[in-house]
Amino acid sequence: MTPVIRPRRLRSTPALRRLASETRLHPADLVLPMFIREGTTEPLPIRSMPGVVQHSIDSARRAAADAAAAGIGGVMLFGVPEKRDAIGSGATDPDGILNVGTRALVAEVGDALVVQTDLCLDEFTDHGHCGVLSVDGSVDNDTTLERYREMALVQAASGSKLLGLSGMMDGQVAAVRDALDRSGFVDTVVLAYSAKYASAFYGPFRDAVESTLEGDRRSYQLDPANRREGVREAQLDIDEGADIVMVKPAGSYLDVLADVAAMSSVPVWAYQVSGEYAMIEAAAANGWIDRKRAVAESILSIRRAGADAVLTYWAVELATWLNERDAR
């Protein structure tokens, strides 16, 4: 008895596999996270993230131009200031590194891609937390919201088209949306890091921003054990006016990503975080995996789970591979 149903027919040639593919990668679906460091005149390598650097303003401009030429969707900027304080004053200083860098990249690439900014205090506070601390050392949610409103206005005035609210404060979307709309920035997009988990995979990122964090962020980031809570947070952010919602990290939370994508009425993004990047780079450097295939497969899996766009440190490199493939 021979099989009548043969699914392998659709896998038998490269052309058939391409035609039957359910999920595709495209440069426009990729966003490149970038670090801009105050006080440097040249790019500085990040030890735990091979191939990723802390940019100077000039090198960031060149990198943004390369990203635009590759056709990716956008760049997400993170600032690394020289000085920090308890309330993260540098975050709301128009001449702070993140806002200066934003203006420089907007001038460089214009609308060729979407210049985006991280809206969080952790890079700017001397204690490394994402908000202002109360006298007992806990993060004061509502006082932090006032700082976020101030940040939003400065970032929007600097030319950021999309604000990435990554602090995981309750009510942050409603607070920022209100501040933007009251000040005339009605077209500035709000991306809510809705399901951001207290993950072990952020370690290299903390090297990249020279984090001063002591302790952890478990009182405001999500418990990795909780799946439904990620969906609840995303729905709350949508109800508050988020234009896009985010799941972070990506690879270890594909179930949450699929759940959020299934219920969301707005685009859903995912962040392939520094630890995910570092693990693949380390395994490839040791010859244990095929680097190119692993990179592409890891991002394809995030798209397959439901992400409309992916923040990844491989954005430009992957886009180059895709462009070369399509040119053949």
Image (cartoon, rainbow, N blue to C red):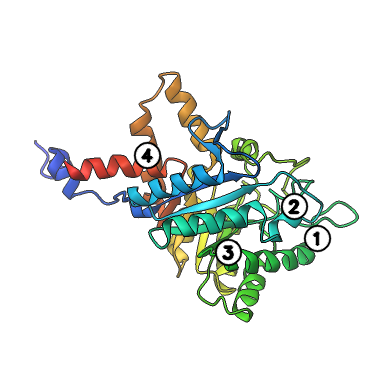
Report whether 58 appears left or right of 5. right
Q: Secondary structure at mark 2?
A: loop
What distance separates the C-alpha of mark 4 from that of mark 2?
36 Å
Frontmost of labels 4 and 2 is: 4
Res. 140 mark: 1
x, y (%) of residue 236? 60, 69
Q: Residues within 10 Å of mark 2 (few under 14, many from 20)?
A: few
Q: Quadrant of residue 180?
A: bottom right
Res. 291 mark: none
What distance separates the C-alpha of mark 2 from that of mark 3?
31 Å
x, y (%) of residue 215? 78, 41
Q: Residues within 10 Å of mark 3 (few under 14, many from 20)?
A: some
One can see residue 311 in this view: no
For the residues bearing labels 1 and 3, Cβ distance under 8 angstroms: no
Res. 158 mark: 3
* Residue 229 drawn above or below residue 38: below
For the residues bearing labels 4 and 2, Cβ distance under 8 angstroms: no
Q: Secondary structure at mark 4?
A: helix
Label 2 or label 3, whichever comes before in sequence order: 3
What distance separates the C-alpha of mark 3 from that of mark 4?
28 Å
* Residue 310 drawn above or below residue 187: above
Query: As shown in the figure, which amino acid type bears the numbered disc 1?
Result: Asp
| Identity of the residue drawn at 56% across and 74% down | 241
Label 1 or label 3, whichever comes before in sequence order: 1
Query: As shown in the figure, which amino acid type bears the numbered disc 2?
Result: Ser
Mark 2 highlights which residue? 219
Label 4 or label 1, whichever comes before in sequence order: 1
For the residues bearing labels 2 and 3, Cβ distance under 8 angstroms: no
Q: Secondary structure at mark 3?
A: loop
Mark 4 highlights which residue? 317
